[in-house]
């Protein structure tokens, strides 16, 4: 069963608790943390994760679009994140490996993401540490973009990598997800889809019933 993790980036933060309750039918909640340096946008950080943790039992899947995630991953774990995913482009290979191990050391799931221009092969050195791989199907930084069709090949490559590793690593896809692109992503091997909660009510039931 493909899991749906709506991104709260488009939520109305003036009534975030109500918005979260309105999408309790989702499988996970997706939090797009942006630092204005790694991506040309700033979103939110630790206080939001801490507050949302108090109002839902859903797994919190935190997508760190930040430089040097090594400095923050443990604080996001302690704030309530269940899954912490960051970008392979965001630091040196040594620090990326250390950050992955820090997340796992907190008993949480650790994932790496690749921007559209970064090949899936960049993830191979970390393969045995990955609980999820995140394929960005848009340039990270903003919701509401169009799905990049070249992502489908990368999803298939990521699925082949996971098969070669023999692990239960999830293949997640993020950006421009709708009914049509979701179906293509699933056919290519995706196991988790991250649609923007544009109306703060993702078509979770619809998506699930459709797929
Ligand atoms: C973009 C974020 C995505 C985005 C999804 O940097 O990582 O999660 O919010 O929104 P849509 O589905 O509108 O592309
Ligand atoms: Zn995201």
Image (cartoon, rainbow, N blue to C red):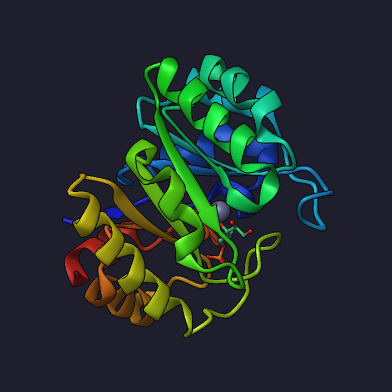
Q: Is residue 210 left or right of residue 199?
A: left
Viewer-closest of 160 and 13: 160
Residue at 30 percent of width and 50 percent of height: 170
Point out residue 9 in the picture as x, y percentages from the top left corner.
Answer: 62, 50
Viewer-closest of 100 and 2: 100
Q: Is residue 58 left or right of residue 211?
A: right
Whether residue 172 is visible, yes or no, is yes
Residue at 60 percent of width and 42 percent of height: 93
Q: How many tags in the picture?
A: 0
Point out residue 79 in the picture as x, y percentages from the top left corner.
Answer: 56, 18
Viewer-closest of 47 and 91: 91
Quarter holding the N terminus? bottom left
Q: Is residue 69 above or below residue 169?
A: above
Residue at 21 percent of width and 45 percent of height: 167
Point out residue 116 in the picture as x, y percentages from the top left corner.
Answer: 58, 71
Whether residue 2 is visible, yes or no, is no
Quarter holding the C terminus? bottom left
Point out residue 148 in the picture as x, y percentages from the top left corner.
Answer: 53, 81
Q: Is residue 140 above or below residue 42?
A: below
Q: Quadrant of ligand 1?
A: bottom right
Viewer-closest of 166 and 20: 166
Q: Is residue 211 left or right of residue 92?
A: left
Q: Is residue 185 above or below residue 136?
A: below
């Amino acid at each position: 069963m493909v899991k749906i993790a709506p991104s709260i980036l488009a939520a109305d933060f003036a009534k975030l608790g109500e918005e979260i309750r309105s999408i309790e039918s989702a499988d996970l909640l997706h939090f797009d943390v942006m630092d204005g340096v790694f991506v040309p946008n700033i979103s939110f950080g630790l206080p939001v994760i801490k507050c949302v943790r108090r109002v839902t039992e859903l797994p919190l899947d935190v997508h760190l679009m930040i430089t040097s995630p090594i400095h923050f991953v443990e604080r996001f774990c302690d704030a309530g994140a269940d899954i912490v995913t960051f970008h392979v482009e965001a630091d040196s290979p040594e620090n990326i490996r250390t950050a992955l191990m820090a997340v796992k050391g907190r008993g949480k799931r650790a994932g790496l993401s690749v921007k559209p221009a970064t090949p899936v092969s960049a993830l191979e050195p970390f393969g045995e540490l990955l609980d999820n791989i995140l394929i960005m199907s848009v340039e990270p930084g903003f919701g509401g973009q169009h799905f990049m069709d070249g992502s489908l090949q990368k999803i298939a490559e990521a699925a082949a990598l996971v098969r070669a590793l023999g692990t239960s690593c999830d293949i997640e896809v993020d950006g421009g997800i709708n009914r049509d692109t979701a179906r293509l992503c699933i056919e290519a091997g995706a196991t988790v889809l991250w649609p923007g909660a544009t109306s703060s009510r993702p078509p979770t039931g619809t998506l699930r019933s459709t797929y």
